[in-house]
């Protein structure tokens, strides 16, 4: 699934800018099971491993005990496919989260859902477990594109999943959409977007398909069996997507994320604000007390209780400043000069004056009301801009 990523910390100004008053850590729980592997997927997820789910939950419980009593104000169950678990397993997982930790009142509690694996019992287990935000992996409302991606669901199932989740009482709903899908045209993308905004969704994460080595789709591409749009075409399509979503009330608040006002994803904002989070489960990453570490991606190893990889990085002040810039500039509001100084004890211009001046001259960045942020041209080429803050 797409609605997750890396990194960590805390920025009061940016939290308040999004109407939040959330100061505790975020909790991510990885569920690495899927009904079938999508053709483009290189996430840590396993098909044909359903028989290991109970043992995996046992292991999760043990890992959670290491952080017992910690407080979280956002929870994100991602994958993989959390909705692939049986209703009873979903019940067990949410109960484990609630009994192991202090979940703040009003916490955002998200769970990822694949439209091909949802039923009424699972939805009811999620609701009873406190889930109040659903992130549904739709990708496209075109059946030909879904088949090309190797998704297990149709467009009609995706529409039904959104409607069922909403009817059950979850009104904070994200859907993931993709551009650059083989066979996708400007018209078919527009059609998917029109369907998306006609549904009761409050948040849309939109990403360009990236072909990762080792996936069947990558092999097809290398063998000349599929063609992808050029970078320019993809940029044009993403521009159309951005205009369309903004016109329909979904403000762009991060490079790939659009939301109706007040529905920005509080959990993901923690990553972009470089705040602390704990990741449980195979391949989950954590950032705690200036240290970054991650779990084994090996399912058997995780189940056997060898959770952690030996690799732990303690971030220097310079590392943190660099991450603050790279992650913060992903957000349309950018980074606060005052916040930079508060965290690092030195002015942002003293550290990054040359880079900031260069990008402002190129029209890729602006400074307003004490914040530096990327212009829309800058957002188009954000990767190259961010590289210069490393
Ligand atoms: S649903 Fe597909 S894209 Fe998502 S984790 Fe499973 S295999 Fe990967």
Image (cartoon, helix red, strand yellow):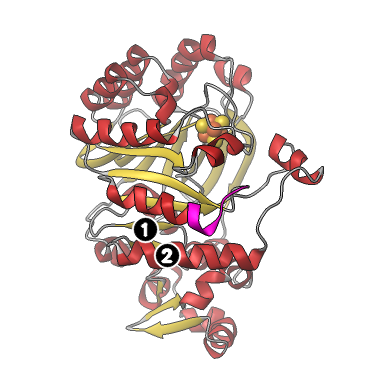
Does the beta carbon of the residue at mark 1 sit less than 8 Å from ligand 1?
no
Span shown in magenta:
183-188
- The residue wearing badge 2 is 242
Q: How far from the left and from the top, in percent, is residue 106? A: 18, 42
Magenta run includes residue 31: no
Outermost residue toward the right in this view: 223
* Residue 93 figure quarter: top left
Q: Are marks 2 and 1 in contact (CB under 8 Å)?
A: yes
Rendered image: mark on residue 258: 1
| Image quadrant in which the C terminus is located | bottom right
Residue 354 found in image quarter:
bottom right
Q: Name the secondary structure under disc 1.
A: strand
Mark nearer the N terminus (2 vs 1): 2
Q: Determine if residue 189 is in view.
A: yes
Residue at figure coordinates x 34%, y 45% from the top left: 174
Q: Nearer the viewer, mark 2 or mark 1?
A: 2
Q: Is mark 2 within 8 Å of ligand 1?
A: no
Decide which of 99, 189 is in the foreground and name it.
189
């Amino acid at each position: 699934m797409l609605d997750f990523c890396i990194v960590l910390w805390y920025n009061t100004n940016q939290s308040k800018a999004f109407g939040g008053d959330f100061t505790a850590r975020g909790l991510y729980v990885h569920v690495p099971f899927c009904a079938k592997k999508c053709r483009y997927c290189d996430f840590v997820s396993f098909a044909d491993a359903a028989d290991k789910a109970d043992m995996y939950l046992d292991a999760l419980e043990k890992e959670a005990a290491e952080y017992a009593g910690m407080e979280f104000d956002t929870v994100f169950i991602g994958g993989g496919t959390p909705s692939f678990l049986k209703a009873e397993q979903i019940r067990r997982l949410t109960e484990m989260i609630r009994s192991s930790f202090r979940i703040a009142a009003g916490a955002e509690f998200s769970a990822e859902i694949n439209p091909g694996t949802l039923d009424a019992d699972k939805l009811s287990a999620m609701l009873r477990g406190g889930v109040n935000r659903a992130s549904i992996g739709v990708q496209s409302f075109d059946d030909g594109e879904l088949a090309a991606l190797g998704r297990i669901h149709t467009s009609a199932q995706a529409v039904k999943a959104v409607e069922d989740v909403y009817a059950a009482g979850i009104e904070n709903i994200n859907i993931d959409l993709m551009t650059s899908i083989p066979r996708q045209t400007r018209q078919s993308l527009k059609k998917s977007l029109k369907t998306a905004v006609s549904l009761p969704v409050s948040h849309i994460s939109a990403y360009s398909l990236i072909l990762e080595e080792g996936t069947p789709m990558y092999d097809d591409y290398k063998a000349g069996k599929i063609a992808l749009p050029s970078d320019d075409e993809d940029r044009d399509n993403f521009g159309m997507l951005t205009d369309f979503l903004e016109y329909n009330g979904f403000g762009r608040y991060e490079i790939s994320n659009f939301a109706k006002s007040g529905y920005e994803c509080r959990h993901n904002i923690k990553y972009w604000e470089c705040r602390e989070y704990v990741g449980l489960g195979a391949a989950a990453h954590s950032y705690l007390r200036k240290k970054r570490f991650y779990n084994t991606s090996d399912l058997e190893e995780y189940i056997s209780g060898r959770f952690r990889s030996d690799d732990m990085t303690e971030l220097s002040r310079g590392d943190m400043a660099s991450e603050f810039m790279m992650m913060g500039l992903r957000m349309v509001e950018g980074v606060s000069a005052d916040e930079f100084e508060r965290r690092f004890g030195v002015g942002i211009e003293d550290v990054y004056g040359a880079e900031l001046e260069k990008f402002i001259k190129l029209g890729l960045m602006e400074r307003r009301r004490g914040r530096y942020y990327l212009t829309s041209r800058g957002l188009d080429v954000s990767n190259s801009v961010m590289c210069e803050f490393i």
